[in-house]
Image: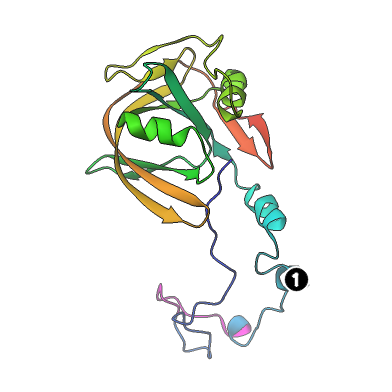
Amino acid sequence: MSTDAVRPLTPDPARPSSRGPGHRHPAGEHVPSSAAGHRARPDARLRQHAFPSDSKHFRNVLGRFATGVVAVTAIDEATGEPCGLAANSFTSVSLDPPLVAFCVAHTSTSWPRVKAAGRLCVNVLAETQRHVCDRLAAKGGDKFAGLSWSLSPAGGPVFDGTLAWLDCTIETELPAGDHVIVVARVHGLDKHEDGDPLVFFRGDYGRFHA
């Protein structure tokens, strides 16, 4: 599953420090005299791993950020067969114009097929659809075998049980390390089924109940 970059734990040089009882924070409040001269002690745990030491550590730390899971689907223009991939890096980007984004690894063999279709459909997966995610995340074979789906208004596969769908076209692709950030324009969307989302956390799947 894709992850996004994090900002290192470094001080902000533009942020003023407390210099005395007359100093004001950006919000305008006075610093209490009892706290004006206080300096926080460095935490050894923060110093130890302030920067990613290796890819495994980077993945483990980013895995503590819970995300939803989507299935990005399309109809292969060359074969007329459905194709797709799973991603946990999906996010909204803009309301005007309506844009969303997700990240795809350079090694993905499914993305070239989805990209070639020009039009794609984002399925927001429910907690009961882990099998859909597993199938789309697997390499090779017919990923849609045994899965029930129908076509969205723009002709993209929508899986039965999906919480919501978004018909999109590719707006732009931005190279980013070993992934590419895909920005897509939304042309149609709606909720589909009620239920709880499929959640990805610490390298495994979970559930969220409102």
Number of numbered labels in the structure image: 1
Residue 207 vs residue 100, the one in the foreground: 100
Of helix, strand and loop, which mostly describes the magenta segment?
loop
Badge 1: few (under 14), some or many (20 or more) residues near its Cα, within 10 Å?
few
Please identify the quadrant where the C terminus is shown.
top right
Residue at 67% of width from left, 57% of height from top?
A: 55
Is residue 32 part of the magenta span, yes or no?
A: yes
- Identify the secondary structure beneath mark 1: helix
Q: Seen in the image, is 150 located left or right of residue 48?
A: left
Q: Seen in the image, is 191 located left or right of residue 129?
A: left
Residue 81 vs residue 199, the one in the foreground: 81
**Residue 178, how many percent across, how many down?**
53, 53
**Residue 48, how many percent across, how many down?**
75, 71
| Residue placed furthest toward the left | 96
The stretch of residues the image draws in magenta is 25-34
Indicate how the structure is coloured in the image: rainbow
Q: Quadrant of residue 115?
A: top left
Residue at 58% of width from left, 68% of height from top?
A: 8
Residue at 22% of width from left, 43% of height from top?
A: 97
Please identify the quadrant where the N terminus is shown.
top right
Circle 1 residue? 48
**Residue 29, how many percent across, how many down?**
44, 75
**In this view, 55 is above or below 199:** below
Residue 204 vs residue 157, the one in the foreground: 157
| Residue placed furthest toward the front | 78
**Residue 62, how many percent across, how many down?**
62, 51
| Circle 1: residue type | Gln
Residue at 71% of width from left, 69% of height from top?
A: 46
**In this view, 179 is above or below 72:** below
Would residue 192 be visible to someone looking at this image?
Answer: no
